[in-house]
Amino acid sequence: MATASLAMLALFLFILSLSALKSYWYIGSGVTATNTISVQGSGEEYAVPDTAIFSVTVIETAKDVKSAQDAATKKGNDILAYLKGQEIDEKDIQTTDYNISPQYEYRQTGCTPTEVTATMSSSASYSCPSGKQVLTGYQVSETFTVKVRKTDKAGDILAGVGSKGASQVSGLTFTVDNPDAIEAKAREKAIEDAKKKAEVLAKDLGVGLVRIVGFNENGNGRVYYSKAMSFDSAAGGVAPQAAPAIATGQNKYTSDISITYEIR
């Protein structure tokens, strides 16, 4: 009787140990892969931009701060009113910089005439032993960043803000407002690329792929195509009188990944 009980206990323990080992193997808890290969994959996805972003700046200079601020505020308000009239939401217009700076001019002082030569007594030069910075006024600048969600209207809006007194318009860039789905497609292509490379490499090496033991994504590279378009009326430039032709093109999204496989 005792012998039978011991045999049954031994069988039970054996089955329990076998079950634990089987679970241990498939779950992989605590299992360190000793034989591995790593492969890299890359993927690209393209999308037509649905949002245009640009910056517009007003710059005003006056003898005192208040006068400069009043002039800059008036132009800024005119531009904001124009943008809202073009169905641009308030949340898509943001003040990104406001600056007040004194303006100085270097002036020489203590200048006295000096005879050049005895034979040229009518000619004289001026000796200015010193100089100083003189405050001439104040400059106020305000910059807005604007999102245009109807890219076909971007050219008209660029021309419009120029006509409303903008001193500078720059940084026109086209983006996709919600790129997550596009980035996911690029990642899927990168993973598929890596899997195919792993299958070919395993076949060449005469080994089998067991499981994935490591994954790394080197970030999603977003390639934005922007237009080098700007004007600076404060520096003597002229704002465009007609709407410039704008071509949105496509944006490229890339994903680079690395997968490590256990092999046997």
Image (spheres, helix red, strand yellow):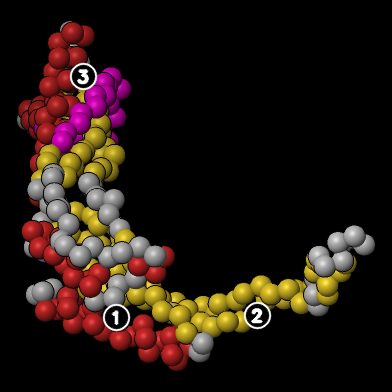
Q: Residue 111: where, in percent of width, then height?
A: 80, 75
Residue 123: give its label.
none
Proximity of marks 2 and 3: CB atoms separated by less than 8 Å: no
Residue at the extreme bottom of the image, as rendered? 66
| Quarter of the image where the C terminus is located | top left
- Magenta span has 48? no
Asked whether, in this view, residue 64 is left or right of residue 8, the answer is: right
* Mark 1 crowdedness (10 Å alpha carbons): few <14, some 14-19, many ≥20: many
Q: N-terminal of the two: label 2 or label 3?
A: 2
Closer to us: mark 2 or mark 3? 2
Q: Which residues are magenta?
A: 19-44
Residue at the extreme right of the image, as rendered? 118
Task: Name the residue at 65% across, 80% down.
Answer: 134
Proximity of marks 1 and 3: CB atoms separated by less than 8 Å: no
CA gap between label 2 and label 3 equals 77 Å
Proximity of marks 1 and 2: CB atoms separated by less than 8 Å: no
Asked whether, in this view, residue 141 is left or right of residue 152, the answer is: right
Q: Is residue 191 above or below residue 81?
A: above
Q: Amino acid at mark 3?
A: Ile
Q: Is residue 74 above or below residue 209?
A: below
Q: N-terminal of the two: label 1 or label 3?
A: 1
For disc 2, the marked residue is: 134
For disc 1, the marked residue is: 76
Q: Amino acid at mark 2?
A: Val
Q: Quadrant of residue 80?
A: bottom left
Q: Secondary structure at mark 2?
A: strand
Q: Residue 56: where, in percent of width, then height?
A: 29, 69
Q: Quadrant of residue 90?
A: bottom left
Asked whether, in this view, residue 135 is left or right of residue 128, the answer is: left
CA gap between label 1 and label 3 equals 65 Å
Q: Amino acid at mark 1?
A: Gly
Closer to us: mark 1 or mark 3? 1
